[in-house]
Image (tube, grey):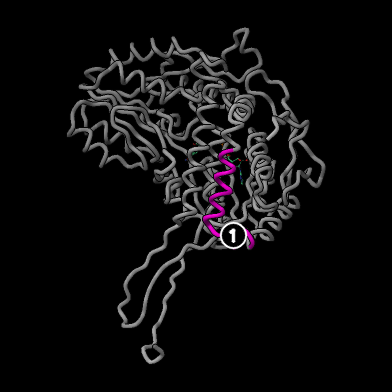
Amino acid sequence: MNNNFQLPETILNWINGKEIPASGGETFEKISPHNGETICKVSRSRLPDVESAVESARHSQEAWADTPAVQRGYILHQICNALEQNQKEIAMIVALETGKSYKEAIGETGGAIALGRFFAGEGQRLYGRTTTSGIANKYASTVRQPCGVAGLIIAANTPIANVAWKTFPALICGNGVVLKAAEDTPATAWIFTKIAHEVGLQSGVLNVIQGYGVEAGASLVEHERVDVISFTGSSRVGRWIAEVAGKRLAKVSLELGGKNPLVVCDDADLDKAVQWTCLSAFSNAGQRCASGSRIIVFDAVYDKFKKKLVDATKALKVGSGDDDDLGPVINERQLKNMIESVNEAKKSGANVLCGGYRVKGSEHVNGFYMAPTILDGVLQDAKITKCELFGPIAILYRVRSFDDALKMANDSPYGLTASIHTRNYHRAIQFSHKIKCGATVVNAGTYGSEPHMPFGGMRQSGNGSREPGTEALDIYSELKDIYMIVDPEQI
Ligand code: NAD
């Protein structure tokens, strides 16, 4: 494939294998989080564009479903090969539109390819079951069948991983896909789809709609002919999607927010705990659903840990280079929201131990850089304790005992990830089993998923679905029972 990744002046939709502008001709600007400059224009799609994309997906879905799953897997492998050949260019696009470093972006792109390979391999499995029947001469089995049209809506935080996370399992199951790209990362979805078409994915099987959530996203959710909606984003929008899509009994998978606890016990290796807290709270500028934002520390080591953590945080380098530790947040609205939240917490008595402001050094001018921020003196029922901020802000809480730590960790509207730092095997096991969340870690960060592992959350972090892993196949396929009756007379 040629290296033809010059970003177009305007990023268009992909509908039926072609790049198509929004029907109303409207666009919006994609702004660089690194310097506030316009990177490109983006099609601002609305209902008529979504209708064309759904029509295209529906039209091509049957032939795609009739393509043997093994062959669908070969096509996905070819997409992965092409992603690998173009990994550097893709990472450059990811870095450009998110402001994260190239190093981070190349790692993320590698993760997306690994996930693609996992699902490509599922083409040779897609297991149903052969099982028993209670009736003589009757044979029971299940097969997986596609849902039909999958409407996929994603967040901007890890754009190539988010595209891969939903697109690969939806395709291997034989669905037609309409992906609503995140408005802050339009180019990643565009380049992924361009590559998929260049290696031979049938036209119309994968469509991409660019635009805003309340316009293009909502039209996709409301569309009667979309059979499954898979959404990664905020709990607020997820709740609305569950209501709207639930009314027509569409299948819905929701991967939502988190306010994740990281517990530091009195027997923890404090230096390692500090290192993992920094990574949990500040990597990707805290824009991870799994990020550690509630740091719950035993009284006996609180002051020592606090000093080490604040020192380590102050030493973090903010910028978009490979030597930097964290980049900008995705847009100015997010940045302002965080600064307001910190100011509000300060008014209610919180101590800002470091950060709390917009970084405005010469290399950061006009970028959306938030200094890594640590607070303490925040009440357990304060708004900032309960609400996800999705940025580089962590709060320290002091507890007396393991039981208090567990109780506080569980006292949250969310339940996505958690971690505990301890040398005590019994504490580690008890915490792992009693914490109410979808993924927990002992002696490392509040980190999420691997391609073959199910990820998802409890309470406001999701609706019980799990993606990726083979569990994602349950979202993008329907199980059908097949009974075969043998008539002995006919043998
Ligand atoms: P968001 O909910 O505002 O937007 C996410 C996506 O939904 C975007 O593409 C947006 O355009 C679209 N959208 C917005 N309103 C919509 C509507 N009414 N109808 C349909 N689509 C709509 O979230 P965000 O601020 O962009 O992303 C951050 C959130 O995503 C955080 O809460 C974070 O924790 C969550 N997230 C969760 C996971 C996970 O796996 N659980 C992973 C990444 C991010």
Q: Nearer the viewer, residue 256 or 481?
A: 481
Q: Residue furthest bottom?
A: 489
> What is the residue that sits farthest to the front in this orientation?
491
Relative side of 70 to 188, left or right: left
Which range of residues does the magenta coloring cover? 63-81
| Quarter of image, res 25 | top right
Within-10-Å neighbours for mark 1: few <14, some 14–19, many 20+: few
Residue highlighted by disc 1: 67
Residue plotted at (57% across, 62% down): 248
Residue 23 x/y as whole percent: 80, 47
> Image point 39% across, 83% down: which residue?
486
Query: Where residue 260 sits: x, y (%)?
Result: 39, 33
Q: Residue furthest top?
A: 362
Residue 239 appears at what percent x and percent y? 52, 48
Q: Which residue shows up at 57% across the image and 24% down it?
A: 329
Which type of secondary structure does the marked residue at label 1 adopt?
Answer: loop
Query: Main structural element of the magenta stretch: helix, strand or loop?
Result: helix
User: Residue drawn 51% across and 13% down?
Assistant: 323
Q: Quadrant of the N terminus?
A: top right
Q: Magenta includes 78?
A: yes
Tell me: residue 251, above or below residue 342: below
81 or 323: nearer the viewer: 81
Q: Is residue 248 shown left or right of residue 56?
A: left
- Residue 457 is at least partly visible in this image: no
Query: Quick check: 99 above or below 235?
Result: above
Q: Position of residue 188 (x, y in %)?
A: 63, 35
Query: Does residue 23 show up magenta in the picture?
Result: no
Q: Tell me which amino acid carries mark 1.
A: Thr
Left or right of 438 in this view: 206: right
Name which quarter of the figure residue 361 lies in: top right
